[in-house]
Amino acid sequence: MPAGVADPRATDPAAPAAPAVALQSAGTTAETKAGTTTQTKAGTRVGKPAPPPQLLVRRAVSLLLLTLVLPGSAQWLAGDRRVAKAALGVVAGAVAIGVVLALAVAVDLGGVLALFTSSALLRMLAVLVVAVAVGEIALLVDAWRLGRPAALPRRARPLVAAGTALAVLLIAAGGLAGARRAWAGADLLDDVFHAGEASGAVDGRYTVLLLGGDAGPDRVGTRPDSVTVASIDAVSGRTVLFSLPRNLEDVPFAPGSAARRALPNGWSCGDSCLLNAIYTWGATHAGLFPGARDPGAEAMKEAVSGITGLTVNYYVLIDLQGFRQLVDAMGGITLTVRQPVPIGGGTSPVKGYITPGTQHLDGYHALWFARSRHGANDYARMQRQRCVMNAMLHQLDPADVLANFEGIAAASSQVVSTDLPAGELGRFVSLAAGARSQPLTSVQFVPPLLDPAHPDMPALQAKVADTLRTATATANAPAPNPSPAATPKAAVIGAARRSAGSVGSRTSPPPGAPTGGQDAGGVPATNDVQQVCSAG
């Protein structure tokens, strides 16, 4: 059309319209360039096609899994870099701390454990665990949002939502369980362990007095039912146990001790002055032991030091009335019983027996096994109690502690009392870990090795010193070179466990002692505890 001449179709209504295809093409092209889509007469949408439903579901599930594996990664892929950087920074910090702790454990396990002997630190850790769990839950919910649940196929929406809810529940349960364990550990530290002055090793060994308290409604005061001295190598953790009879008489006190100043001639007044009664005497003369958490236990420490010639660093008192709870909390113990042990007796009828054979004992039966008096004497009970202690030492592994920690902590706070400072707990946990892999040497001072009514204290002290020298020399001896036909690792471990279960390097009875005979109580008069039981 010539320039300057108007198009008649612009003013004439009767003029034919422009072709619809041309107008549609022009409009579609213009709006497509603007980044939008347009609706055609046929009702079809022109533009970028929607992703297939399978791809949308796969994307939503992948975002959830990425959040579980690496928190913050889903937000990073979805473009929310600010949230992603914060989450990934927390993860990187946690990984770095874990690596540092792992390296530190390889160098100094006790030092790492000492970090967690602060109740304040454990409570902070509990709060931190909850905060991390809440953050992870928030990231999961955000990942579910980024998965565009409204765009998912109708059948997939409830499944993705259920998976998200399940993940949230698992994270919440795990965070709550971790926080409760940390808080329970803090409660245990506050209830049992207190700040105090640490006692250093003497001649390379720590000496701990283990007392089995026998308090009860039918008894006046606490009287230790069992008295055991644990001498622990300060480097290897190898332990020697010395069991003392509770009816020991003519007990001397350590030179320079408060009890020695009060009773210079010792605890000596015949059958009325037995070793286990010193606890009650100390409790009623608390003024002699200023600053002591438990004057009765302090008096026992001074007595045992006078008996053995060893400096007693700490004591641990276990209330046998609550011992049942502790064994139940750790899931029971397994023993191989050699002789039937009655349940009941004395002032009550015998209700049954713990029969010979390998038995898994719960707290009720373990307590009766350790304390049953019917048809037995104190020496047989000492042997059984020693076997129970050995079983607990070798069967309570870290996995059991972690799985049952809340119950163990709750029971321990009611069962155990000690003057071991909280700051020293890490050291002794590390030593106990070392002791579990080594044989347990044990000496039981029973007739004829010792006459409780007329004890030969110099001979007893000589036996203690000789046993410790042998244990130290054995621990420091170089390991033999393995032969080409070395025993497989599993067999070596099994042999070590069998040795530990039979109380390791047992002390042989002196010449003339019966090794398989019976004493007046109808039980073996021998130091061989394996004739009574073994920890299996």
Image (spheres, rainbow, N blue to C red):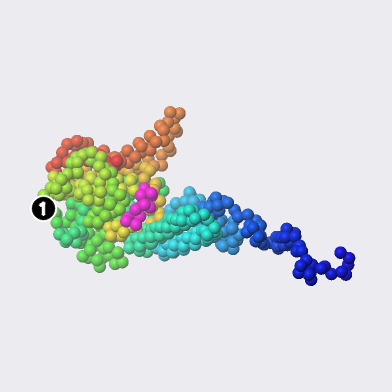
Q: Nearer the viewer, residue 296 or 491?
A: 491
Callout 1: SS: loop
Q: Quadrant of residue 407?
A: bottom left
- Residue drawn at point x = 42 percent, y = 57 percent: 169
Corner quadrant of residue 536 = top left
**On the picture, is 132 further left or further right than 23?**
left
Q: Is residue 68 left or right of residue 315?
A: right
**Residue 127 location, x and y as percent?**
44, 64
Circle 1: is it few (<14), some (14-19), or many (20+) Cα within 10 Å? few
Q: Is residue 34 visible?
A: yes
Residue 196 is situated, as x and y percent measured from the top left of the image, at 36, 63
How many numbered marks appear?
A: 1
**Which residue appears at 47% of the width and 60% of the height?**
137
Q: Amino acid at mark 1?
A: Thr
Q: Residue furthest top?
A: 485
What residue is at 42 percent from the left and 62 percent from the top? 126
Tell me the quarter of the image containing the N terminus. bottom right
In terms of depth relative to the viewer, which is nearer, 410 or 29?
29
Q: Nearer the viewer, residue 189 or 259?
A: 189
Magenta part of the protein: which range? 397-408
Q: Main secondary structure of the magenta part?
A: helix
Residue 79: image location, x then y, percent: 61, 59
- Residue located at (79% from left, 67% from top): 9
Residue 34 locus on image (x, y percent): 71, 63
* Left-right relation of 52 to 235: right
Determine whether 343 is above or below 36 in the image: above
Looking at the picture, does residue 513 appear above or below residue 275? above
Residue placed most toward the observer, 23 or 258: 23
According to the picture, the residue beneath numbered tag 1 turns out to be 347
